[in-house]
Amino acid sequence: MAAEKMDVEAAEAKLKNMAHSEQHYFNSYNHHGIHEEMLKDEVRTKSYMNAIVQNKHLFKDKVVLDVGCGTAILSMFAVRAGAKHVIGVDMSTIIFKAKEIVQANGMSDKITLIQGKMEEIELPFPKVDIIISEWMGYFLLYESMLDTVLYARDKYLAKDGMIFPDKATIFVCGIEDGEYKDEKIGFWDNVYGFDYTPLKETALAEPLVDTVEVKAAVTDPCAVLTLDLYTCTTADLSFSIPFKLSCRRDDFVHALVAWFDIDFTACHKPIRFSTGPHTKYTHWKQTVFYIKDVLTVQQGEEVVCNLEVRPNDKNRRDLDIKIDYLLETQDVTRKAQGSSQYKMC
Amino acid sequence: MPSKEQLRDVEPVSDSESSDSRDEEGWNDIEEDEEEVQEVISLLDDRVFPDVMSMLVHCKEKHNFDFLAVRQRLQLDFHGCVKLVNFIRQRVHEGLPVSEDISVADIDHEQYLKPVLDDDAVILGLFDLPELTPTGLVSQGDNAALVNDLLKQKADLQEELARVSAQFERYRATVSQTLDERWGDVDQADKGKDSAQKGEKEDESQYYWDSYAGNEIHETMLKDTVRTDAYRDFIYNNKHLFAGKTVLDIGCGTGILSMFCARAGASRVIAVDASAIIGKARENVYHNGLSSTITLLHGKIEEVTLPVDKVDVIVSEWMGYCLLFEAMLPSVLWARDRYLRPDTGLMVPSHTNLWTAPVADPDWVADNVGFWHDVYGFDMHRAMARGICDEARVLHWPRDRLAGSPCAFRMLDLYRVSTADLSFTAPFASTLDRDVDALDGYLVWFDTFFSPTRPAATAPADDAVADAWAAAAPQERVAFTTGPAGKETHWKQGLLLCEQSEAAGPAARKQGDRVAGEITFSVPEDMPRGLAIKMTWDEGRRSQKWSLK
């Protein structure tokens, strides 16, 4: 235990030397709350569990790498599925809790846990057969660990190795959200009788992580970006993609909402889960982008959009997002075009 | 949101409040820099010129020294020119004559790369000199063309200079106007930052100011109608207390309380906040036409310079989780002692008291503690539930999950309390109002009182309850509770979860049983903005500590 304590101290010293934003990212995971929330997110945890334990034929006698292992729940699923050995890696000091948990469950000889940055540590195996990771952030990419997973893939994944999950898709649709937009954005027009419009601009630039009701959807969802984890690169995480939203009914569009689906295609019976408004709640909720205009749309019309996403230059865990929209109609009074900048930080 | 602040920095008007390294001296620096660009001191005498070219023309005409010709003859690059300038300056400084027959060997010493004059505008201006003509191409005719070129460039540069000077004048006018209107209205936060870097304890507070820089926390507070309505109602219902008065708003945030006071008739409001949100407050104040009444100061209250010696009213929303978390009250008390008019000054709010009650909720405990025993078939209890009872949790607790009567254990009279009083031990007692299988913990909350008169007769009793006290004089008194019986506030309540140990004997208790002991509030040594709570009960047989981080 004394040695463990020194490990913890060394890890904390290491964390102290990092840039503040990085430190915040890793330290925020040290609290129980976030792990409790993630473990209690059944859509997430059960999907991973099923993808792993229902595919013993894939995991049996394999060497598995768990990137960002947290409390090591996925590592333990892999052991349960028959893995020869699992390496769990996490920068956060939660990994010392993970060590205790692994020990309490009698898996210490099957799971090696390493505290550190993937890019800086040395694995006890030159290659791994399977990479498992729950790397997704809000809006898929915010504070995501995908770049670390891709690094691990390029460095450690054996030829014909597998990645769980291996596909991620970002969806966008337009929603009617007048009441809530008024509450979130219109609020600043009159705060106890005062004009607070300076804060309104900030509010418009902050995407809102919240749950959206499926009945709010005015357009069909559109799959904007699909990431194949076997082939994509970090360059693919900066993108500018045009897409079209077709309107299902006559209504107003106040915002675009984004979510993502996750696929484990390597499974015997493919497993997929969605974080969209049409299905069960997840801790990722959805991400709402309020636009400046209110679009008055008719059934069958299309809104032409473009989504641009780039990691922020100063803090690459923050995202700079730009959404362009254009509603072309014969009716000049409804014609609308605009562009909004957002920052997730 | 650092990037947004930087965007705002581009606008001169809001510049004076931004959190960057701009203070009063900073402005002077900029002026000096700009003026030095205009001041080109002659190489050969004391005369001053607006640009390098006119100075060189002067040297040629007056002293028969053609700098450009020497440069041309020696084929000097930029560094060569720097050496030439410093060589000349050195000779002039030593009182030696300077002639055109300088050789490369004369100036070829490293020492001449060091400026003789600090911030020598001639050296800065070397970039603007015409290109060197390659050797062999210079004829008499070319010389004439060169002179024409130089004259044209000179004219262009003078035009450019005039444009930049005009721009800078406008810029300076805007700044001085801002400063004149509200002389104290400058960024004093940097002083704080400097000293913060000296002392580690203070340095740790930076995260605290940063945490208030974003929108969301202010949205939460403004939308907490229990909180914001209380301040509004007290200020608007008691306009006579504010009319013509000087008010100090400590931790002004978006400026809402300052604007309430201004609208209630205050003649002057000084609003102080160390967080970058004050930039938004300034915009809000401006948009609402209250700039002439409200002066905003960016910095810590202990470090900013107020434009007045005394104030009539201190208004502040300083309350934290479990009242004292975040430790903002000591700053308010410091300001009270330093700035509030003795005998007549008003504290808004004027009193707060702390409450506790025992709780029992086996379902909640099962969901939040028991959960770790079986997580998808794995046991995480030892690792994840250890320490679960060491931290106070901030949550909204339903009234019907209390197990006994609430007890007011500490009244803070904001006219009299001192910072030392904020660490204390007080007795508490509660009678259980139902049978419970176990005492799962204690809930802590506070009530806040706004009294329109200074203490004594009208002060709330130590165990005053917000609603009842305010109802006794509804025209002028305002009070609110953050307890489980009131409407939910953003402070919620603090839950102190008790360890369940078999060693402590049977845990079940009966309706009517008394739970009593002592509660201690203190500030942890390593966490100056944290809070440590200790409770002792069952005649000292049970005792536990919690921290709020």
Image (spheres, coloured by chain):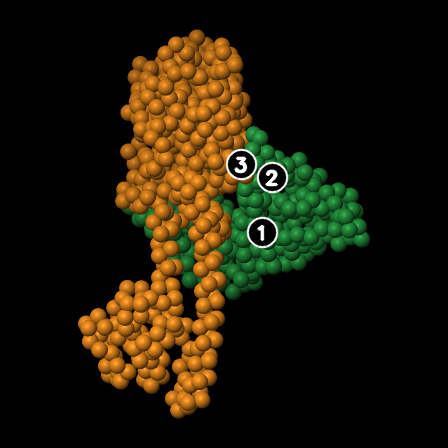
Chain colours: A green, B orange
Of residue B437 and residue B441, the one placed in the foreground of this image is B441
Residue B235, image x and y in percent? Answer: 49, 23
Name which residue lies at 46% across and 80% down. B148
Q: Can you tell which quarter of the image residue B269 is in?
A: top left
Q: Can you tell which quarter of the image residue A127 is in?
A: bottom left
Q: SS at mark 2?
A: loop
Name which residue lies at 40% across and 43% down. B186
Gap between marks 1 and 3 measured at Cα: 29 Å
* Residue A37 appears anywhere in the view: no
The residue identified by callout 2 is A185
Tag of residue A341? 1
Tell me, yes or no, whether the two marked residues, 3 and 2, touch with CB atoms within 8 Å: no
N-terminal-most mark, 1 or 2: 2
What is the crowding at mark 2: few (fewer than 14 residues within 10 Å), some, or many (at least 20)?
Answer: some
Name which residue lies at 42% across and 49% down. A21
Q: Is residue A155 above or below residue B445?
A: below
Q: Quadrant of the C terminus of chain B?
A: top left
Of all residues, the one furthest to the top in this rendering is B512
* Residue A125 appears anywhere in the view: yes
Name which residue lies at 43% across and 8% down. B512
The residue identified by callout 3 is B289
Of residue B188 and residue A266, the one placed in the foreground of this image is B188
The chain holding disc 3 is: B
Q: Amino acid at mark 1?
A: Gln
Gap between marks 1 and 2 measured at Cα: 15 Å
